Amino acid sequence: MDKLLIRNGTLLTMSDDRQPRKADLLVVGGRIKKIDTVVDRNVKPDTIIDASGMVVLPGFIFGHARLGFSILRGQVDQLTDDAERERTALRLIANLTSAQVRTSAMLGICQAVHSGITTLFDGGAMRYTEEVVEAARELGFRLFCGRMLADRTRDWPQQLRVPLREQLADTQALARAVAAVPDGLVRYAVSTTNPIMCSDNCLAQARAAADSAGCPLKIALTTDRNQVEVMHREGGTQELSRLEALGILSEHTYLVNPSFLSELEQNVVRKAGSRVVINASADLKLGRPMSRLPEFVRKGTPVLAGFDSPLYGGRLDAIRELAIVATAFRPQYGFQTMQPEQALSLLTVDAARALGIEGEVGTLEEGKQADIVIVDLGKDIFAQPSAHTNPIYRLVYEASACDVAWTIIAGRVVYGAGTVTGCDEQELLERAGTGLMHLLEES
């Protein structure tokens, strides 16, 4: 049974006692076996990591991205009109091949573990989502994932206009494929695009599929300001009212991008027990209204941080997102909003609780899965001198992804010594560049 010993680190366990402590941490068979000031030196570990001067904490958990589109990052940044950006994005997505989706997912996972992300709830893709699942398995990444459903798509490219019955068949096949390999890392989920692009039947079928599989249902809400204004002008049923009327909302429903929810709608979400996913850096980048994260937190609604699609969002960078979550809401809500301890909790223990996996990950505790990130703050000249400073504040205000030294998932080092294990990153980057060039030529 593999043994990993992390010595001399400053532990932020994120359990009930949030005080940093100097300790050793022993991992046996993928789980945390012991945390002690000094682990018995008679233990014969297979691997030893000297974390002297480093911070050891639970791996970061994020609620949204689209790994299968990673090679498309930046391709619509120059477009300022929402509708034109969406049309261009769909055209590019429609021409992705299965091999390009696989490369995209590999690239996205590599970017994630470089910054200490150990769990991600992916939004899936319209085609080839199985390639995202296989990429996660190949790299040992913890993933929630499922095919994205949408059936009001007459304005979409032909390749993406698939009858709902075929989409549901794909969804069921992927659910069986995920269940066939019970590795504990990849879990199935059901996803839809925004309700404007889904019929009532599509949304109801998505809810039924999630309930049947006992898995989460993710719904991406509308982020196009023009679409929202049209709905308000025409006085039709708003997105959330429609979801509530259809019985879609529950504690297993995850609403992405709640930028336009009113205070009344926030209360509806809270009463239903639904979760929200807030993509703060994408909101800032695209000039969307900032989702009211502090209000959701104050009202007790479970919140996850996310990244949005690589076509729209920023870097898949947990440390950067941590700093944004901690600071972006202060101009509106005041300096006391989202203090470093609360921001770090949001990306670890609170995120695990929101996903229903707090019994396995989210804190460093004996018996739990060893999902761990080790951050070396000692090499950052901009954060020096560092004596007598709080490591949580340093992590939130001073760190960058370059400071992540190791990322460990289920006791296995997936990133260390500057590279992802089990992946030739240089070859992957070359493959991604070539794939993008071919895609742009086709599109």
Image (tube, grey):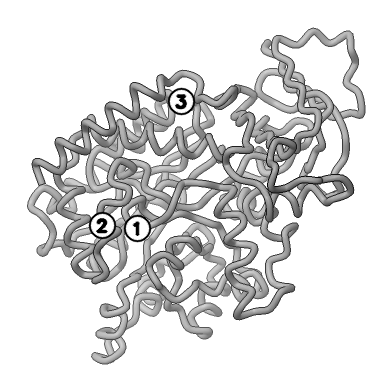
Q: Residue at x 15, y 43 (%)?
A: 440
- 61 left or right, relative to 364: left
Under mark 3, the amino acid is Leu
Vertical order, 337 against 379 (above or below): below
Q: Earlier in the sequence, mark 1 or mark 2?
A: 2
Residue at 45% over, 78% down: 261
The residue carrying mark 3 is 139
Residue found at x 48% / y 80%: 265
SS type, badge 2: loop
Report the front residue among 335 and 239. 335
> In the figure, is residue 253 to the left or right of 342?
left
Nearer-N-terminus badge (2/3)? 2
Where is mark 2, residue-wise?
76
Q: Which mark is residue 312?
A: 1
The three-letter amino acid code for the residue at tag 2 is Val
Of discs 3 and 1, which sits in the foreground?
A: 1
In the depicted structure, whether residue 64 falls above or below residue 6: below
Cα–Cα span, label 3 and label 1: 25 Å
* Number of other residues with Cα within 10 Å of mark 2, as a class: few under 14, some 14 to 19, many 20 or more: some
The residue positioned 21% from the left and 33% from the top of the image is 435
Can residue 217 be spotted in the picture? no
The one of 204 and 89 positioned closer to us in this rendering = 89
The answer to whether mark 1 and mark 2 are in CB contact below 8 A is yes
User: In this view of the protein, can residue 225 be seen by the observer?
Assistant: yes
Q: Position of residue 274 (x, y in %)?
A: 52, 65
Q: Nearer the viewer, mark 2 or mark 3?
A: 2
Does 72 sit left or right of 22 as displayed? left
